[in-house]
Amino acid sequence: MPTLAELQASLAQRLTGDPAAETDPTLSRAARALQHKRMRAVAQLLPRTRKVAGPEWSQLFSQHAAGYTPSGLLYHVDDAWEFGLAQARSSNRAIRRAARLDLAWLNLRFARSPNRGAQRVRERTGFYFSVTVDPIVVSLRVPGRRPRVFASSR
Amino acid sequence: MAAVAELPFLGAGVSFRPEWRWDVIRHRAELGLLEIIADDVVGPAGQRELLLLRDALPLLLHGIGLSLGSADGLDPARVDHFAQLVEIVRPPWVSEHIAFTRVAGVDIGHLTPLPFTREAIDTVARNVETLRSAVPNVPILLENIAYTFLPPGQEMSEAEFVRGVITTCDCGLLLDLENVHANARNHGYDPIEYLESLPLERAVEVHLAGGVEHDGIYADTHSRPVPEESWTLLQWLVTRTSLRAVIIERDNDLPRFEELLTEVSRASRMLHAHAR
């Protein structure tokens, strides 16, 4: 019999991997449910990307989810961030621009460390300013004031 | 753990959602308490909100990501975060699940069942001791989870396992009756027989929620009103225990807050009718 640590490591890998590749039907169903839960949470954090991606959204997210395991207290923000970064490089211009705008909003609320762990994503405090192109997006956060994003529609 | 009757009687309340921030404040007289998910309180803004809520009504802290069942121990950063919140809230007790959510650096993002084995009981006991040293003098409750699969290698029944964990860890019992209802339905056992096998003298708090059936599996989605089956279990339980609190949980498809208040009111009446 495997040890508890071995059993848990195996389960964690199977539950966070590609549900279609899992041969045990109960684990495959659990992995699918988990992926669906992640997708719903990320859709709320990247609303523009979700809307623009339309019917492609599920497939795009499934590809991302099978290859990335988020971490930290703000697990779903980390997930959304990684997915958003990938979509910000999409060959589809509309998706790429929507993802960049969603990421601008995430950047105003949170800061993300390159290191995995409980505190990978933190609430942003203090002053923040950034400018990106395609679309032109100016993000501004001043402590005590409502964060603002100014985006070009072109 | 202190005798249950020595803990404060708080009545019925809800699990906090930021969408209900002002509803909670406005209806605080109708709520006995509020339960805060510790993992949702991140950063200074979250802590400021906690202070605002703490001034409005009694708060409990509930963890979902400490992963008390992890064979490789607790994440010190998460334990520190939990302990900081305990320091701010000073709750009468705290709670977490009998499950694991993380192992070997992989966050599963969901409460995952442990095998019903002695090794798993000892692992939870070791991790609870670590948590207890970070939050001394605060009673710890452990909650039963819903599961759609079980890891291989079971040595005992679910009820024997939960009893073993609760008594070995010397913790209180947080009974999620929706999880009991879901497991009984999905795995074909009698929920009352299950409850009778638990150390009910340690039952302090109850969680109620509603789920949906999908592909022949009843899923604990926290997206529907509490089903009658769970209300029946609560009625059975209140006559046999000294429960101190009931929490109505709703995480998805959030209704108007007033709808939730009718469920709070029903739970409150049942609790008060048999308060000890």
Image (cartoon, rainbow, N blue to C red):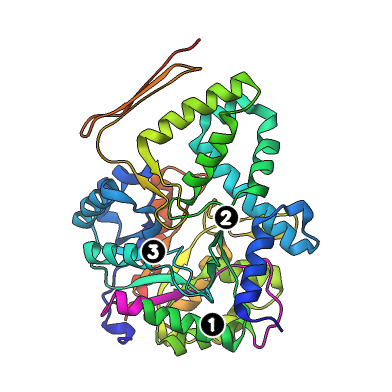
Locate residue B8, reporting x and y percent. 26, 75
Q: Amino acid at mark 2?
A: Thr
Q: Nearer the viewer, mark 1 or mark 3?
A: 3
Residue at x 36%, y 33% (from the top left corner): A108
Q: Quadrant of the N terminus of chain B?
A: bottom left
Q: Amino acid at mark 1?
A: Val
Looking at the image, residue B203 lies above or below residue A13: below
Query: Quick one: label 2, few (<14), some, or many (20+) residues within 10 Å?
Result: some
* Label drawn at residue B162: 1
| Residue at mark 2 | B221
Give percent across and percent down for residue A114.
45, 47
First to last magenta residue range: B131-156
Main SS type for the magenta part? loop
Q: Horizontally, is B74 left or right of A14 in the view?
A: left
- Same chain under badges 1 and 3? The reply is yes
Q: Are marks 1 and 2 on the same chain?
A: yes
> What residue is at 41 percent from the left and 84 percent from the top?
B202
Residue pointed to by mark 3: B78
Residue under mark 3: which chain is it in? Answer: B
Residue closest to the eye, B142 or A35: A35
- Earlier-in-chain disc, 2 versus 3: 3
Question: Does residue B173 appear anywhere in the picture?
Answer: yes
Rounded to the nearest whole Å, what is the CA distance between mark 1 and mark 2? Answer: 22 Å
Residue A44 location (% of width, % of height)? 51, 37
Q: Earlier in the sequence, mark 1 or mark 3?
A: 3
Measured from the top left, where is residue A120 in percent x and y? 42, 51
B34 or B190: nearer the viewer: B34
Tell me the SS state at disc 2.
loop
At 32% across and 66% down in the image, what residue appears? B80
Packing grade of label 3 (10 A; few <14, some 14-19, many >=20) is: many
